[in-house]
Amino acid sequence: MMPKAKTGKITPQIGAFLDEEEKAISEAIEADDYVPASILTPQMRAEYQAIARAAMNEGRVKISLRLPESDLERLKAKAMREGMPYQTLIGSILHKAVS
């Protein structure tokens, strides 16, 4: 049974439903000396970083653009649903339009 907080609401007990393996993982992560393991080799990491830098430095230019507020709100909502910054979405839409 979960304990009740002073407000009368039920307070969830974190970890109450973990099996032994999950408890061990949780304790390891919460330990002060935890260092997450990476599946990337140093060579793979360097390759991915080079690719990312090349994509980011592709001669980008800052612009100023006036849009109706309603359009901007819809762009922001769509970007949020797709999990990306709204400026990236705008850039993608413009790129598709001119390609």
Image: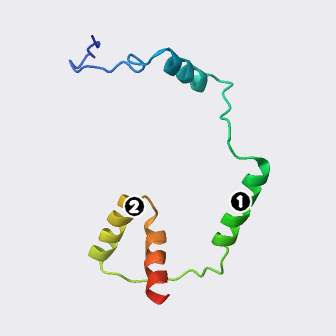
Q: Quadrant of residue 81?
A: bottom left
Residue closest to the far right: 43
**Residue that badge 1 annotates:** 49
Residue 42 at x, y percent in the picture:
78, 49
Identified at 36% across, 18% down, the residue is 13
Count neighbours of disc 2 (C-alpha within 10 A) and say few if under 14, some if 14 to 19, many if 20 or more.
few
Residue 88 at x, y percent in the picture:
49, 70
- Quote the CA–CA distance across marks 1 and 2: 23 Å
Identified at 43% across, 19% down, the residue is 18
The amino acid pointed to by label 2 is Glu
Mark 1, secondary structure of its residue: helix
Q: Report the coloring of the rendering.
A: rainbow
The relative height of residue 46 versus residue 97 in the rendered view (above or below) is: above
Disc number for residue 82 = 2
Callouts 1 and 2 close, C-beta under 8 Å: no
Residue closest to the far bottom: 98
Residue 52 visible from this viewpoint: yes
Residue 70 at x, y percent in the picture:
27, 74
Q: Quadrant of residue 94?
A: bottom left
Count neighbours of disc 1 (C-alpha within 10 A) and say few if under 14, some if 14 to 19, many if 20 or more.
few
